[in-house]
Amino acid sequence: MKLIVAIVRSEKLNEVLEALFKAEVRGLSISRVQGHGGETERVETYRGITVKMELSEKVRLEIGVSDHFVEPTVRAILASARTGEVGDGKIFVMPVEKVYRIRTGEEDTAAVTPVS
Amino acid sequence: MKNLRVPIFLVAMLTGLALAEDPEFSAADTAWMLVATGLVLLMTPALAFFYGGLVRSKNALNTMMMSFSVLGFVAVAWALLGYTLALSGDGNFIGDLRYLFLNNVGVENKGAIVAITIPHMLWMIFQGTFAIITAALVSGAVVERMRFPAFLLFITLWSLLVYAPIAKWVWGGGFLADLGAWDFAGGTVVHINAGIAAVVAALVLGARKDFGRQAILPHNVPFVLLGAALLWFGWFGFNAGSAWAASATAGLALTNTILAPAATIVVWSLIDLMRTGRVTAVGLATAVVVGLVVITPAAAFVSPSFALVMGAIGAFPSYYVLLWRARSGMDDSLDVFASHGIGGITGAILTGVFAQKSVNGLFDGLIAGNPAQVLIQAFAVLIAVVYSGGMTFALLKLVGAITPLKAPIKEEGVGMDITQHGEEAYTSGEGAILVNTESAMPAAKPKPVGGTD
């Protein structure tokens, strides 16, 4: 099992979700995060005060998958989240020691396999 | 506070002078019209909240700015040129230039309407608030995608070339008034006009990139309700103020302005209940606006019981056009057409049905045995639709030839607040670093937007 953590542009989230559902990835969590990944800062002005916004709004997806689902998941995110500009985000694939499904107590691969 | 006292003092002094000079001048009428003018002006910021709540958070400021900037651009255009085009002279189609740059607009009674009992200047600015709200209404069709500079240019020209002539035809003694078409507070001039311009603008501009592909949801429904509440409040000035006097007519108009939307709320809610089993808040806010639009042309022409009937009937066409529009390819984003265009047409026609001479002292409608009035009303609607549609189309093409109308897809994705204004509606300020240099705005130089996010 792996845990895939992806950080993507907020405005690309809908396309990413669409691509993931098409790839039959069903279980995921998202959170709104702020971060910086080398992109140029945007400049904003409030009442004559000019500020550089160093942190950008991003969306972080966390997806626990069984091994043979890693490849399709990563490919779906790569294809749907890319604009080609700096700031498109990252995908991290991490090993997972143990997974439990709380409702049934199922473990590991059974726990990350979607209920049919 | 000092700044505020000076104009109030001046107005008091000037009205006093006019009273001394003109026996027909009425202090009571002037007092009411001072209030009514403020009420109608409030409708435009109210609309900013109504529209601002309906869009996504990344476009909230841009949407509200469209209404707020109209408060400046259209007001200035009205004072310099629009007023004289709309409400001067004996011409049938367009005014002359006698009031250009507010020349000859004094505090004494000498506007286009002889019978009026308030200072000419006050009447000019009261009418100006109508031009402002009408222009702001159109913005609902182009939100979340139109470049801001293009919008400013378009809407300023629109107020001069579309609004002013139609106002002349209906209120300035033009040919629609001569024909016998009645429009109490601006159903044709304001609502049909804005509704049709909205359709044309939505079609010329094209849809938002996410339209029909993703759910686009309102980001703040309480804002929508707040906007509807303030619009209703401002509408008392709009309708009852259109009596141009503190009169029984104004009392009737105000009563109808409460009763008609009330009936629309009831019917709209019942349709909602029967269709989906739930009454929605955005639906109710829309119903308030539709009811107000429907009663606007008839405000002081029909009895309160027929105002209830008009409000009730008015719910149906707008409700179903709204449903149809959402499934069509036309991205009139905030349903200006369904609310104001369809509501305005319904109201204009029903004015010809339910008007009674016993109520308004002027003319009868179908119900009082004058079916011809319905045809006259329909003809006026047709003229407004054709002119507003054609002229709006030509104007957008003209502005589009000068500067691009639509923001690039990437900018639309990032959001119009950041790309058009360099501000965000809801920012935590985390990670914001103060820039001390007074150098030219770095945001002004175009750079790839994707890279700035």
Image (cartoon, helix red, strand yellow):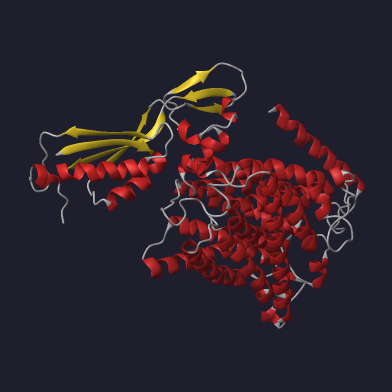
Q: Quadrant of residue B335?
A: bottom right
The answer to which image quadrant residue B391 occupies is bottom right
User: Residue at 55% across / 23% down in the picture?
Assistant: A50
Q: Left or right: where does residue B120 sit relative to residue B419? A: right
Q: Position of residue B425 (x, y in %)?
A: 49, 36
Image position, residue B21 (x, y; %): 92, 46
Give me the residue at 49% from left, 68% from top. Answer: B267
Quadrant where the N terminus of chain B sits is top right
Q: Nearer the viewer, residue B99 or B441?
A: B441
Q: Is residue A114 above or below residue B170?
A: above
Number of numbered discs present?
0
Quick one: B284 or B164, which is closer to the camera?
B164
B389 sits to left or right of A50: right
Q: Quadrant of the C terminus of chain B?
A: top left
> Which residue lies at the image location 43% right of the left edge and 27% below the top edge?
A39
> In the rendering, at what x and y percent does residue B451 appear?
46, 32
Residue B239 in the image: x percent, y percent?
67, 58
Residue lying farthest to the top in this orientation: B436
B111 lies left or right of B152: right
Residue B300 visible in the shown view: no
Against B410, residue B196 (above or below) is below
Outermost residue, right side: B21
Q: Is residue B286 visible to us here? A: yes
Q: Quadrant of residue A32?
A: top left
